[in-house]
Amino acid sequence: MQWICVSLLALACLHVALLALVVVLGEEGRSPRMQYHALSLAKRGFSVTLLGFCNSRPHHELLQSDRIQIVKLMELQSPAVGPPVLRYGVKVVFQTVYLLWKLMWREPAAYIFLQNPPGLPSIAVCWFVGCLCGSKLVIDWHNYGYSIMGLVHGPKHPLVLLAKWYERLFGRLSHLNLCVTNAMREDLAENWHIKAVTVYDKPASFFKETSLDLQHELFMKLGCTYSPFRACSEPSGPAIERSAFTEKDARTGVVTHLCGRPALLVSSTSWTGLSDLACVLAHHGRGEYELGEGCLETGKGPLKEHYSRLIGQKQFRHIKVCTPWLEAEDYPLLLGSADLGVCLHKSSSGLDLPMKVVDMFGCCLPVCAVNFKCLHELVKHGENGLVFEDAEALAAQLQMLFSKFPDPAGKLNQFRKNLRESEQLRWDESWQRTVLPLVMDT
């Protein structure tokens, strides 16, 4: 009887050990790193529950995995009346109770992987649940939440100072800390006394160069909704199918680039104050007469309508601007079809790196990126792309890169060649080398 009891206890412990929660107090579809954590855990035998807002669809690999359950969190809004600080406080209280209820309703897990930011109130709630259920808390530091709040309220605002104190206090209570750059790891250790391990963002396996056949299919699909993808001239025959960039001979099935096609420039943006969209608008005003290109700015965010209106007021002769929101499966295909990526992300803390550039590099897409403190950990100026400080520098770089487009001997092709030869690690392989041993040790 004693042996049976011990065996049942061991089986119960094994069952708990194979459960993991991945928590994002934000939109799952716009949190690729946490989606990748869930996929990597599932591939190592964990049953994973991913909790987050579901305003956009996650990648199909998560939806198809029988080891991943997606649980929708309701996005609570602040009350419409009262002082802003009071409204925010009420929202945090409701979020605390709601998240606590959602987590306690689930089976106890061995690990709780939590994205920060946003960490208020999720760090404290996940730590408390971990204490009650015996779960180990793993915080993945993408940035500092208080630094993002500081962009709105100012760094000395009482709410920002309170958020910084909270993040520092509860961040020390986790069992394991991951972060996105060496600069952040050093800052956590020096200023917060938190020992973290750098886990660089790496592209998932589906970020790769797109074949011409798939490029053509994508352009034809997008052309049904967005006019810049449609052909500017009639095809040469009834058997020819043409987009703005490619054409397909239906008799042979052969797809080729159009002669004299425009360059395709992609900028993935969250349409917030962290993206220096003024640079792109200023560039369009300066470089428009020297270049012929198509510019896509993808993504969602609070300032999208504002910047879309500003773009609409511009009268371009040689540039077509498109601002689509792409399905998760189409985004990697678009990056793999583009000629250049532009990154406008500016870190609020100066310690995180733009994952959009990681994805672009996974597709062997060269990048022009606005400079900030630790960008050198990712973008090597003159090797895999270019770094700029302002609109004038961006305009000069684009004129240099596109003045003889398409030029087989030009800088763009050299950057792409360097990316192909760089033997980039993919996310899952990197995760197995860095995160899995840490999880097993704890």
Image (cartoon, grey):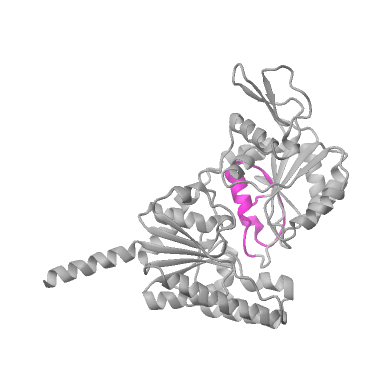
Q: Nearer the viewer, residue 78 or 269?
A: 78
Residue sitting farthest toward the front = 80
**Residue 327 place in picture, x, y as percent:** 60, 46
The x and y percentages for residue 357 are: 63, 50
The answer to whether residue 171 is visible is: no
Residue 123: x and y in percent read 52, 74
Q: Is residue 259 left or right of residue 103?
A: right
Q: Is residue 132 visible?
A: yes
Dividing the image into 4 quarters, which one contains the C terminus?
bottom left
**Quadrant of the snapshot with the N terminus:** bottom left
> Could you say where residue 416 lies in the image, as x and y percent from the top left?
64, 38
What are the residue bounds of the magenta stretch? 351-380
Q: Quadrant of residue 436 in the image?
A: bottom left
Q: Residue at x 54, y 49 (%)?
A: 203
Report the residue at 59% width, 57% height from top: 55
How many numbered circles does the render carry?
Answer: 0
Using residue 317 as the reference point, say whether residue 274 is left or right of it. Answer: left
Say if the magenta span includes residue 325.
Answer: no
Where on the picture, by quarter, is residue 21?
bottom left
